[in-house]
Image: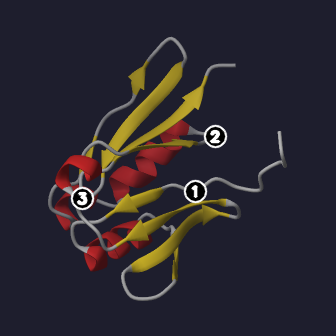
């Protein structure tokens, strides 16, 4: 390896940048604006992504992000308490699905980006 990395951050698009910013703020992510139509969105120190004011249906609807959490049931309960589908058109929240590697549930953001929220079996 040439040099160890410090972080890795993906870029995701938004159909409506303002609405996506509100969506992620509702999820209690922190937005750090970096100019018009561009923000770093973080959930904790060192964990985040870049949100941009750019929409391509095929790209957004084929983007997936995995967020590992400690307590999946509690995280889902918190998400459900936010009533995201009632506040943001196109947003979907699934129930927990069990798999051989662990458990997860899904959130589709306003642009169609698919979030996997899960825990790995130990």
Q: Nearer the viewer, residue 101 or 75?
A: 101
When the figure is inspected, residue 61 is found, relative to residue 49, above or below; the finding is above
Which is in the foreground here, disc 1 or disc 2?
Answer: 1
The disc placed on residue 9 is 1
Quadrant assignment, res 53: bottom left
| In-front residue for pair 102/60 | 60
Q: What numbered label is drawn on residue 95?
A: none
**Residue drawn 43% across the image and 72% down it:** 25
The secondary structure type at the circle numbered 3 is loop
Q: Residues within 10 Å of mark 1 (few under 14, many from 20)?
A: few
Q: Is residue 39 above or below residue 88?
A: below
Closer to the camera, 109 or 10?
10
Of pointers 1 and 3, the one earlier in the residue sequence: 1
Answer few, some or many: residues within 10 Å of disc 2's Cα (few below 14, many 20 plus, some between 14 and 19).
Answer: few
Q: CA distance from mark 1 to mark 2?
A: 21 Å
**Do callouts 1 and 3 mark residues in contact (Cβ within 8 Å)?**
no
Q: Which residue is mark 2?
A: 70
Classify mark 2: helix, strand or loop: loop
**Residue 52 horizontal side relative to residue 90, left or right:** right
Residue 47 x, y percent position in the rendering: 63, 57
Question: Relative to 122, is 96 on the left or the right?
Answer: left
The residue labelled by disc 3 is 111
1 and 2 marks in contact (CB < 8 Å):
no
**Are dots 2 and 3 in contact, CB under 8 Å?**
no
Per the model, the C-alpha gap separating discs 1 and 3 is 18 Å
């Amino acid at each position: 390896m040439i040099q160890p990395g410090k972080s890795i951050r993906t870029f995701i698009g938004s159909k409506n940048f303002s609405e996506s910013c509100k969506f992620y703020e509702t999820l209690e992510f922190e937005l750090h604006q970096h100019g018009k139509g561009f923000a770093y969105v973080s959930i904790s120190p060192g964990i985040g992504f870049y949100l941009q004011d750019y929409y391509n249906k095929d790209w957004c609807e084929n983007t997936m992000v995995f967020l590992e959490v400690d307590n999946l049931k509690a995280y889902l309960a918190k998400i459900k308490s936010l009533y995201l589908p009632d506040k943001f058109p196109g947003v979907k929240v699934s129930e927990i699905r069990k798999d051989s590697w662990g458990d997860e549930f899904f959130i589709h953001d306003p642009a169609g980006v698919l979030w996997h929220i899960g825990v790995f079996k130990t």
